[in-house]
Image (cartoon, grey):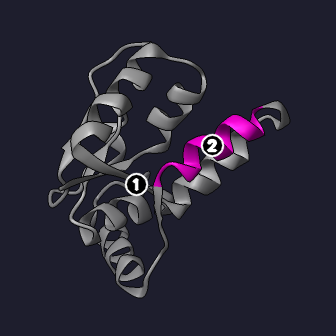
């Protein structure tokens, strides 16, 4: 079964009730395993309002969460070191490394955050 690592932008859209995000995740979940990095979980909780906690927890509980392993940390460090852009954030390197280590498609609307050539990226194609 295909595996998709869902980036925080899509999960935030889902939590905000964006129909495109809901449809996208619904379609993916029929034929794929949906997961997220623990970094994505931290990003979601950092921006969450207290009133959104139940909905957020329910969404994240429905995804497989992938912890940062030594392999993922090494790959992320190599991405950060080898990518020319100084604007590349370590959190995005960790998310990208998680997708690569897990042989997962990284689903994100922020393609520019992931310039790494080895990644299998997919943009959901919906608009807000």
Residue 62: say if magenta: yes
Q: Is residue 73 above or below residue 79?
A: below
How dense is the environment of label 1, judged by Cα within 10 Å: few (below 14), some, or many (20 and up)? Answer: many
Residue for badge 1: 35
Residue for badge 2: 58
Give the side of residue 18 with respect to residue 103, left or right. right
Give the side of residue 120 with respect to residue 106, left or right. left
Quarter of image, res 38: bottom right
Q: Compare residues 89 and 125 and report the one nearer the observer.
A: 125
How dense is the environment of label 2, judged by Cα within 10 Å: few (below 14), some, or many (20 and up)? Answer: few
Quarter of image, res 102: bottom left
Per the picture, the main secondary structure of the magenta-coloured stretch is helix
Give the side of residue 37 with respect to residue 112, left or right. right
Residues in magenta? 52-63
Q: Name the disc covering residue 127, or none.
A: none
Q: Residue at x 53, y 53 (%)?
A: 40
């Amino acid at each position: 079964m295909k595996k998709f690592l869902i980036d925080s932008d899509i999960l935030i859209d889902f939590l905000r009730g964006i129909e495109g995000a809901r449809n996208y995740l619904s379609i993916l979940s029929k034929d794929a395993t949906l997961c997220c990095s623990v970094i994505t979980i931290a990003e979601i909780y950092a921006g969450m309002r207290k009133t959104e906690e139940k909905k957020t927890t329910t969404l994240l509980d429905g995804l497989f969460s992938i912890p940062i392993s030594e392999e993922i940390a090494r790959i992320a460090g190599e991405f950060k070191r080898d990518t020319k852009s100084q604007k590349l954030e370590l959190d995005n390197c960790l998310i990208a490394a998680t997708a690569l280590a897990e042989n997962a498609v990284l689903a994100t609307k922020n393609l520019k955050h992931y310039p790494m050539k080895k990644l299998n990226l997919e943009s959901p194609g919906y608009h807000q």
